[in-house]
Structures are given as C-alpha cells and as structure tokens.
Amino acid sequence: MAADGPRPRLPVLLLTGALGSGKTTLLRHWLAQPALAGAAVVLNEAGAVALDAGRAGALRDAAAQGAAPCLCCEGLPGLAEALEQLFWDRLHRRVARFDRVVIETAGGADPAPIAQALRAHPLLAERYRLEGVVVVLNAEPTAPAMSAQVRGADVLILSHADRRSPAQQARLRDMARGWNDEVMCFDSSAHALCAPGPVMACLAARPPLLAGLPDGDAPFQPRAWGRPARHQDPDRARRPAPMDSQETR
C-alpha cells in the first residue's frame, strides 16, 4: 500500500466585527449550513479565550439542532493555547473530528496579530492555515479597531442592510473599499442573512490578505512533537529530587 502523502493543514476562518454588528447571529446561521458543517468554534475575547454565556448558548443550540458540532474552548489563557489544545484533542479523539476552525473575536480585535500568530507559533504554523478574514460591518469604520478590521478583511458582510436605503448601503460599501480596495462585499439583513456558500467560494479563490505567504493550501510537513505540557504526568513536578545515600552529619 502506498504511503499517505502530507496531510493538509486545517483552515482557520476568522470572523470579526464591532460589538452589535451581528456577527454572532450570522455565525449561528452559518453553523446550520452545509458549508460550515464539521467546524469547531473558538470565541476569543480581547486576546484570551473566554465564553459569554449567551453567545455560547446560542452556538451550542445551533449545534444541537443538527448542524455543525460546536467546540467552544473555555477557560484557556490564550488563543494559541486553545488552538494547540484543539489540535491535540482532535488527534487523540477526545473531541468530535472537525475539518475547520472558526474564530469569532471580540468587537475590538485587530485580525492582524491573530494571523501573525498562526504563522509564528511553530505548531500552529504546521497544523493550521488562515483561510480568510470575514468582517461584519454595520457602520462607518471610524474607530481605529474597525478600520484595522476592514483593512485586513478578505470579505465584508454589510449587515443590517434592511435598516438602510440602497443608496446608504452603496455609500457604506464605497467607504469600506476606500480602506481596502481588494475586499469583496456581501449584503446581509435580518430577513435575508448572508449565506456562507458564496463567502467560502470567494475565500477559496485567492490567498488571504493577511496570510503573509502565498501558500494557503500548502500541506504541513509533520515532524516529531512531544505531548503538550498539560498532558504530561501531573505528579512528576511534585516528586522530590533523589537524596544522597549518605546521611548529612
């Protein structure tokens, strides 16, 4: 039997947007669609993984309704550790198998440092790849955090479109493209939420702006890795060092 070739890296979809933009509602809708079936979900708050009870419940409800399994990481001190732990849990079958990770960030998060972490962290760089940055935008990107999100976006979801006239929606789109002329825009409203299929197809058509290297689909080359520290023998650190056989006088 021929040996298996290099395994592809797991894609990471980064979803961000200002507080109140509607990104959690959109994500809940997307988890119920085939395009995101089999996704793990990480909720990242201000650089540390934490769960808001309401948001976590909404995502778990979506999973329970027969959609993609929701794997919410809770109580971990950092996003890099969360992704590393997800990889080991998947490898050792401690969680249901997933084929993609969706990170929903806090409203003020800049996507660039997260993309950089995927490149700089040795294990993450070999096991994951940035699939794309999707930003949910419902207002003019005036705040620095919002403008940073728009500048790093591969796709913009212009939410609450039903609250604006077509001319206002066009102005918001033009304003966003003034910050990022390569971004693709999709409209979304309460009664017609943006579907994930066209967005995922758009992301698949070109490398992410924040990928850093044009190798988004390149497989990783496995190398030997020790088990992460959290899975090492917890008693080892507490064992006393061997004593000298001679008594101290």
Image: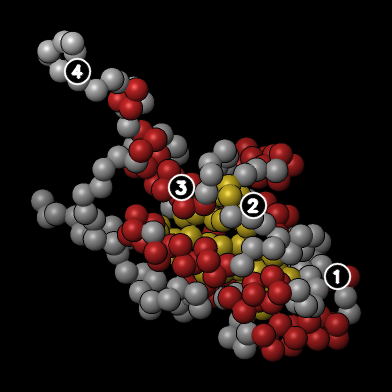
49 horizontally vs 220: left or right: right
Q: Where residue 37 sits: x, y (%)?
A: 53, 51
Q: How is the image coloured?
A: secondary structure
Q: Residue furthest front?
A: 249
Pointer 3 with pointer 2, Cβ within 8 A: no
Q: Label 1 amino acid? A: Asp
Q: CA distance from mark 3 to mark 4?
A: 36 Å
Q: Is residue 14 left or right of residue 195?
A: left
Q: Secondary structure at mark 3?
A: helix
Q: Which residue is mark 1?
A: 162
Question: Which residue is labeled 3 in the image?
Answer: 81
Q: What mark, if any, has residue 45 been given in the picture?
A: 2
Q: Earlier in the sequence, mark 3 or mark 4?
A: 3
Residue marked by disc 4: 243
Q: Nearer the viewer, residue 19 or 117?
A: 117
Amino acid beneath label 2: Glu
Q: Please report whichever mark, 3 or 2, sits nearer to the chain's N-terminal start.
A: 2
| Res. 31 visible in picture | no
